[in-house]
Amino acid sequence: VVHRRTARVRVMTGIICLRKPEGITSFQAVRKVRGITGEKKAGHCGTLDPDATGVLPVMLGGATRFLEFLPTTPKQYRAVMKLGVVTDTLDLTGTVLETRDVSAGREEVLSALGRFRGDILQVPPMYSALKVNGQKLCDLARKGREVERQPRPITIHELELLGMEAEGVRLRVRCSKGTYIRTLCKDIGEALGCGGCRALHGIARLIMNQAVVLTVDIETMQIITYLQQFFFIFVGLPI
């Protein structure tokens, strides 16, 4: 992050790899960063669900002009899939539409995962920020409306079973831009014949490319920003 002080304002330009906490939207996270740094221009790439944690790149100042030029390299997630539960939001925040018995064991789950590796088509969920005819799908969904969505090509580079426990099936996913983990959980559940959705806990974006990413949380940012009154600190590399 580069600081440029003028007579009246401090301008910040650069990227902060924020470790987004659970319980806030990506937009709210960016708003917090804007308030802490005092930089009016800020934007993010790669939206995370409110209950998801992990890497959220935040662009500050002049860096916002380069959002569209950032590389679209694979992203990696850790998630928990709840089998036997079908909801309207495809995760456990939504209304439960149906519950089913689950008879699938480890071998059946491994077999089902194999069907979703590689290049596949995925229908985006209604509860998403995608727009149809200028309207966000999530806004239409909250009004009780459902519209047709065209399947979109995505790539699942890696899909690994980490474990099967009482709270759900733990997965590691490395995938292309535009992949919805909620939809992936739903589709795997349907392939197993019992339905499924993403559990509330355990979803985290680990990396956004092949490089190791160092992140900073909001509380640390507040401390660093305070100390910058006295010392020059490179915000992108916290202790």
Image (cartoon, helix red, strand yellow):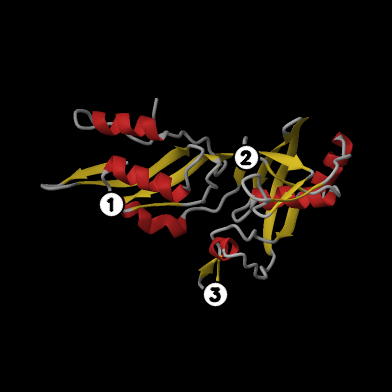
Q: Which residue is pictured at 53% across the width and 47% down the height?
A: 48
What residue does disc 1 label? 40
Q: Amino acid at mark 3?
A: Asn
Q: Residue at the left extreme?
A: 7
Residue 103 on image: x %, y %: 89, 39
Are the residues at dot 2 and dot 3 in contact (C-beta closer than 8 Å)? Answer: no
Q: Residues within 10 Å of mark 3 (few under 14, many from 20)?
A: few
Q: CA distance from mark 3 to mark 1?
A: 30 Å
Q: Which residue is pictured at 60% across the width and 56% down the height?
A: 178
What residue does disc 3 label? 133
Q: Amino acid at mark 1?
A: Lys
Q: Nearer the viewer, residue 15 or 149?
A: 149
Q: Is residue 42 above or below residue 141?
A: above
Relative placement, left or right, of 234 versus 169 is left
Q: Which residue is pictured at 72% across the width and 41% down the height?
A: 81
Q: Is residue 66 above or below residue 111?
A: below
Relative placement, left or right, of 189 versus 79 is right
Q: Is residue 178 above or below residue 192?
A: below
Residue 224 on image: x %, y %: 30, 30
Q: Residues within 10 Å of mark 1 (few under 14, many from 20)?
A: some
